[in-house]
Amino acid sequence: MSLLVKNIIRFILFILVQVYVLSQIPPLHQFISPYLYFLFILWLPFNISRFGLLLISFLLGITLDYFLGTPGLHAAPCVLIGYLRPFLINILISQEGAELNYAEPSIKSMGFAPYSLYVLVFTFIHHFYLVLIEWLEFGNFLYFLGKVMATTGISLLLIFIAEMLFFRKQKFRTNTA
Amino acid sequence: MKNIFIFIRRYFNFLFFVVLQILSIVLLIKYNNTYQAAYAGVANEVIGAINDQYNKVQNYFHLKENNRLLLEENTRLKNLLRINFENADSARIVALDSLIRDTLGHQRKYLYLPAKVINNTVSQQMNYLTLHRGANQGVKKDMAVVSPQGIVGTVIDVSENYSRVMSLLHRNSKVSSMLKKSKVIGSVEWDGKDPHYITLRSIPKSTPVAKGDSVVTSSYSANFPPDLMVGTVDEISKDPSSNFFIIRLKTAANFYSLEYVNLIENVQWDEQRRLEAAPVKNQ
């Protein structure tokens, strides 16, 4: 399957899972709302252009927003992590050259510790910015702190499960072939 | 001029990022002020169609509960039928020449329309419902939405075949309500915490309130007809900074299993609004 088709299917699946499964779960607590859809941005290939990355991130966010009835609320954090992604990838895999040998970020291509850090940082940035916008609308500092922590925790758990369930096979590519 | 182009090319990604950020925030702010999303009509139609497909499956899981609710409501309405009320014949004049109701329909104020809920969230801070009934089927903005047990929300956005409803569980929703016993009027809001509970504010501390009291829509609310169930009093606390209670209500409607609702149109509202908008003469 080509990368393009694979990513289009992924886009649709992530949106559907987020809208019809995760957003339908009865809330356990005010602070806990499960988010997984932004993993799509983290799974995009290495060699995608920065312009393309920004555009796709915006599309993902705005699609979810129209489903949930909050235009712009999820688009803004998505664009932010889409913009920051190349910088962090450069820092995390500067010397190994993994972006040439593997198609997309994963545990195998980046190593367990750098990949965990990559996921952790972007999950935190996404939720921080998302809840910050909500907080500016409603105003309650405790809500802000609690929700950032709780949603980040839940999202990390969900990402961990997703990584275990859908083990992505990564082919090792060489330049010589 | 050349330098400007070089600058733009060099920082193109950053500028594009800033543009997209501004676009998102502008969309959000504009939407929060007006509830008119950009391209809402098109988006509503497309997303409504997808929701509809999903709902066809989901619908089966609530059939049993819905049948029970409909039966209960039918029973309640049948109990109101005039045929059930009969006095021992003590009257001297048989006065059946006039009904309380206006059977010709000239004086109609509220019009009920049925609709199917095809999407509904309770877990966000701003919750919305999508109904499979739109402008082509007579839905207008600001119509009230009620379920068999209690009020649900207000229509905020209408496309051709679908409409979007701001749920009672929305940080910005506000419904004028009153205590059924004492007829004291306050307003019902949601604090975003628990979808089972809403908050009733601006009830003076002198009002007698007890746990379990019913709260219904007030007659001041323009889109909701009076005396529709909103919830029951669950917890009463005194706001130390003001002269009012903060009353926690248990919602009458069960927002987890909404399947069919009624839309209510206030047919006389236009006239009322025109009168209220007109500048006051003759002071």
Image: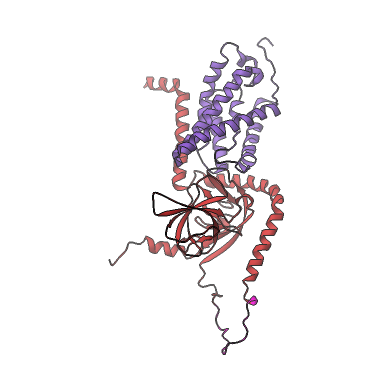
Q: Position of residue B2 (x, y in %)?
A: 38, 20
Quadrant position of the C terminus of chain A in the picture: top right
The quadrant holding residue A43 is: top right
Quadrant position of the N terminus of chain A in the picture: top right
Q: Position of residue B66 (x, y in %)?
A: 68, 56
Q: Residue at x 53, y 30 (%)?
A: A126
Q: Position of residue B117 (x, y in %)?
A: 62, 52
Colouring: by chain
Say whether residue A69 is left or right of residue B70: left
Q: Is residue B95 magenta?
A: yes
Say whether residue B109 is left or right of residue A115: left
User: Residue lying furthest bottom in this view?
Assistant: B92
Counting every numbered tag in the picture gives 0
Q: Residue at x 52, y 64 (%)?
A: B227
The prevailing secondary structure element of the residues shown in magenta is loop
> Is any part of residue B157 visible from this angle?
no
Colour in which the image shows chain A: purple
Relative to B163, residue B104 above or below: below
Q: Identify the chain drawn in red.
A: B
Q: Is residue A96 magenta?
A: no
Relative depth, front residue between A10 and B220: B220
Relative to A43, residue B77 above or below: below
Q: Magenta segment, which residues?
A: B83-99
Q: Residue at x 47, y 44 (%)?
A: B31
Q: Position of residue B248 (x, y in %)?
A: 51, 52
User: Residue lying furthest left in this view?
Assistant: B283
Relative depth, front residue between B230 and A137: B230
Relative depth, front residue between B82 and B1: B82
> Is any part of residue B146 visible from this angle?
yes
The quadrant holding residue B271 is: bottom left
